[in-house]
C-alpha cells in the first residue's frame, strides 16, 4: 500500500475534486485563496544531521512550494510542532520564520504538542488573481514540458554527493518563479518533490493526455556520471523545482531559468526517448 | 516546562500578537477569515478504546471549536494524517468528514504520511463579519463571566463516570452558539478545552483585568458527589464549552443555553468564592 493508493481511499470520502491539486482553492474577496498542509517528521523526512533550524526551514519550504506551484503569493503559515525535546522548539520556529520571511509570508498561528518524535505540520495560505491560477489540469497536446533549475540534487546528496547538501537540507521553493509562470500562461504545474517521473504520472492521471521526454535535454547535476545523474533527475525525490506545461509560443519565460525537457502528447502514456518511463520515485509505503 | 511556558518561546520568535487568540485573523474580502491548527495523536489525545471514526471526529471538533470561539462560521478543513496502520485512514477521514458536515464545513485538502503512531493535524478556516468577531481580549470590569453547557463531563469519564463517554469521545463544538454570541455582543471568548481555571488565567494574561467566580453557580455534571463535580468543572480538560464575558444588559442570550458563573473585576487575579483559584488543568509537559 502506498500513498497514491491511499489517496483513492480519501477521494472516495471527501470527493475527487478535493484531491487534484497541490493546494485547495476557494474564493477570497476578488481573488482566490490557495491552502495546503504538509506533515514532516524526524524518521521519514528530517535527514540525520539536520539542525532544528533546518527542520523548520524545510517544513515551511515544502508548503511554500505547493503555493508556488499554483502561481500564488504565499501569505500566511500555521505551524503545529510535536516535540520529543522542548529544546528543539526555538530552532524549528526560527527556521520556519526565516523561510517565511525570505518568501514574504508570515507565521500567524500554531500548536505545540508533546510527541514521540519531532513532527512538524505546516499549513500555508496564499492569494492569487483567478486568471493567474495554475492547476495540475490544463495541459494540452503540443504544449512543452519544462522544469525550473536542476533536478536530482537532493537525491544526489543522499547517494553520497555531499556538495549537494544545501539542496536537501535547505530547499529553496520557486516562489517568485511560480508567480511569473502563472502570469505568463503556464497551462499546468506542480512541484517535483517526489521526482519528475511520479510528477508526470500524477499530471497524466488528471489530464486527458500524456508526456514524452527527451533525456538529452534534462539539466543534470554536475560532478556525477551521466547515467547516474539522469537517474537522479528522473526518479530522485526531495527537490522543489516546478514542472510545468506551457504553449511553445509563450516559452521561454523571462525571469524563470528553466529547460524544455519534453512535450505533451495525445497518447495516455509517459515515455522517455521513446520508451515507457518507469513509475517510481519517492513514496511512503505501508505493510 | 509546560506548553504555556513554551508559548513564550514562540512569542519571542513570531511576535506576541500572533499568539493571543484561539485563531489567527486576517482580511478576506469584506469579511475576516480565522485560521487555527491542532495536533492530536494516539498517546496523548486519543483515549484507549476510541475508534478511528471517533479519532477523526474529535480531530475536526477541536478545530471547529476554536473557530466557534471567535464567533466565526467554519468553512474549510485541511487534515494531515500520520498513520502507523493504513487501515485507520478510512475511519479517521469519515469521522472528520461527518463532524465537518454536521457543522457546515468541508474538507478541502490534506496530507498522508507514514508515522510511528496515529497523528492527526487539522487546520480550520472560518469567516465572520468583522463586527461580530470575538477575541480573547475585550473583557471589561462589570461584564459577566458565563459558560455554555455543563463543564467537567469529559474529565468525569476519565475519572470513572462512564455515562459521560460521549462528552470525551465525540465532543460537540459550540459552533452555532459561538456565532450567536458574537452577534449578541460577547466581549471576550475562548473554549475551555484545558479547563475553566486555565482558561480564565489565559484570559487574564491578555486582558487588563481579572475574574471572580461563585462556585455555587457552576453547572455541575450530575451523578457525581458535589465536591468532586466542582473540581471536575473547574480543572477538568477535554470539554469544548465556550467561556465568555458579556455586559449584563446583553445576557441571557436567546438560543444559547449558558450560565453566569462570575464577574470581570479590575483586580489582576482569579478567585473563586473569594479565594485564589488554582492555576492548574490540562497541560502538556516536558522533562
Image (cartoon, coloured by chain):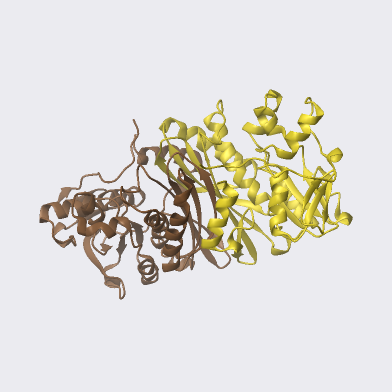
Chain colours: A yellow, B brown
Question: On the rendered structure, is A180 left or right of B284?
Answer: right
Residue at (45% x, 38% y) in the render: B116
Say which quarter of the image contains residue A117: top left
The residue at the far bottom in this view is B254
Q: Which residue is drawn at 81% across and 42% down?
A: A257
Residue closest to the eye, B133 or A66: A66
Location of residue A20 (image quadrant)? bottom right
Lateral position of residue A80 relative to residue A136, left or right: left
- What residue do we see at 73% from left, 43% from top? A278
Residues B135 and A217: in front is A217
Hey, which residue is sitting farthest right in the picture? A249
How many marks are shown on the rendered structure?
0
- Look at the image and tell me whether residue B128 can be seen: yes
Q: Which of B183 and B3 is in front in this view?
A: B3
**Could one spot residue B144 in this view of the protein?**
no
Residue A103: quarter of image: top right
Q: Position of residue B194 (x, y in %)?
A: 30, 50
Above or below B17: residue A24: below
Point out the image quarter for the C terminus of chain B: top left
Amino acid at each position: 500500500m502506498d500513498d497514491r493508493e491511499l489517496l483513492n481511499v480519501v477521494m472516495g470520502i471527501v470527493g475527487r475534486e478535493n484531491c487534484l491539486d497541490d493546494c485547495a482553492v476557494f474564493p477570497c474577496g476578488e481573488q482566490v485563496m490557495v491552502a495546503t498542509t504538509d506533515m514532516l517528521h524526524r524518521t521519514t523526512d528530517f535527514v540525520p544531521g539536520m539542525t532544528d533550524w533546518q527542520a523548520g526551514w524545510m517544513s515551511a519550504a515544502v508548503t511554500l512550494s505547493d503555493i508556488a506551484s499554483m502561481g500564488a503569493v504565499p501569505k500566511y503559515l500555521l505551524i503545529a510542532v510535536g516535540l520529543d525535546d522542548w529544546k528543539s522548539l526555538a530552532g524549528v520556529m526560527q527556521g520556519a520564520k526565516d523561510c517565511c520571511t525570505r518568501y514574504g509570508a508570515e507565521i500567524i498561528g500554531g500548536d505545540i504538542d508533546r510527541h514521540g518524535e519531532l513532527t512538524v505540520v505546516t499549513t500555508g495560505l496564499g492569494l492569487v488573481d483567478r486568471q493567474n491560477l495554475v492547476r495540475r489540469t490544463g495541459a494540452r497536446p503540443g504544449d512543452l514540458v519544462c522544469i525550473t533549475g536542476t533536478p536530482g540534487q537532493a537525491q544526489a546528496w543522499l547517494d553520497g554527493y555531499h556538495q549537494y547538501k544545501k539542496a536537501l537540507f535547505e530547499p529553496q521553493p520557486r516562489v517568485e518563479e511560480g508567480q511569473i509562470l502563472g502570469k505568463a500562461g503556464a497551462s499546468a504545474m506542480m512541484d517535483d518533490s517526489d521526482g519528475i517521473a511520479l510528477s508526470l504520472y500524477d499530471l497524466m492521471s488528471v489530464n486527458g493526455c500524456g508526456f514524452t521526454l527527451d533525456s538529452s535535454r534534462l539539466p543534470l547535476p554536475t560532478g556525477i556520471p551521466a547515467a547516474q545523474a539522469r537517474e537522479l533527475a528522473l526518479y530522485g525525490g526531495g527537490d522543489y523545482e516546478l514542472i510545468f506545461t506551457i504553449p511553445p509560443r509563450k516559452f521561454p519565460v523571462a525571469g524563470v531559468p528553466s529547460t524544455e525537457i519534453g512535450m505533451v502528447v495525445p497518447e495516455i502514456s509517459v515515455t522517455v526517448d521513446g520508451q515507457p518511463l518507469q513509475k517510481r520515485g519517492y513514496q511512503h509505503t505501508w505493510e
